[in-house]
Image: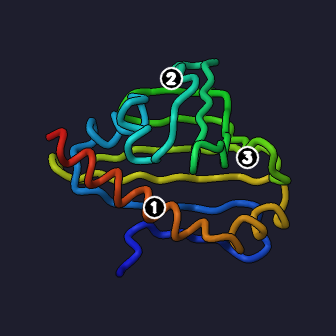
Amino acid sequence: MEKKTKIHAEEGKQEILITREFDLPLTLLFKAYEQPEIFEQWMGTKVLKWENRKHGSYAFETSHDNRVVFKANGTIHEFIPNEKITRTFEMEDSPFPVQLEYLSFEKITDNSSKLLMHIVFQSVGSRDQLLQMPFAQGINIAHNRLQEIATKLI
């Protein structure tokens, strides 16, 4: 199966660029990142805190067999509806340091849009360590679910 989410990681740089085009209107794509009940569905997680505004914060956790297996949180630095979100992202209880994420949302047509994610890591080593995990596969699966779930909201 084709990976529709594209990840570009230039050798020796501490960043990755992620792009994905969706068959969704821009407002619906953004809503999937804005509304916690939609986010929970496509990410398969439970939202603990969700303050989508400048200086807001968020936290979520994922469980398996009634055991928390993943927790993440961050601070929102910029939140412009249907345009961009700038935030930090921290995986709790992991060796990965906090990363900075720039999410940009672009209209392609009335029924299609694009997500661009620019993620900056503390070091090239941290970035490379994440890329050795099934990160690309996981984000592609999540974005496929986002497309599927948001399409039902049209």
**Residue 95 against residue 30 in the figure, above or below:** below
> Which residue of the protein is positioned furthest toward the bottom in this rendering?
1
Callout 3 amino acid: Gln
The residue where tag 3 is placed is: 99
Image spot of residue 15 (x, y percent): 70, 60
* Above or below 104: residue 121: below
Label whose residue precedes the other's in the sequence (3 or 1): 1
Identify the disc placed on residue 95: none
* Mark-to-mark CA distance, 1 and 2: 22 Å
- Which quadrant is the N terminus positioned in? bottom left
Q: Residue at x 42, y 37 (%)?
A: 33
The residue at 62%/30% (across/down) is 59
| Residue 79 point in image, percent of width and height | 50, 26
Horizontal placement of 26 versus 79: left or right? left
Q: Quadrant of the C terminus?
A: top left
- Residue at position x 53%, y 23% in the image: 50
User: Residue 60: image x %, image y %?
Assistant: 59, 34
Read off the residue under disc 1: 19
Residue type highlighted by circle 1: Thr
Which quadrant of the structure image shows residue 141?
A: bottom left
**Secondary structure beneath label 3:** strand
- The quadrant holding residue 13 is bottom right
Count neighbours of disc 3 (C-alpha within 10 A) and say few if under 14, some if 14 to 19, many if 20 or more. Answer: some
Q: Earlier in the sequence, mark 2 or mark 3?
A: 2
How far is the residue under mark 2 from the one under mark 3? 18 Å
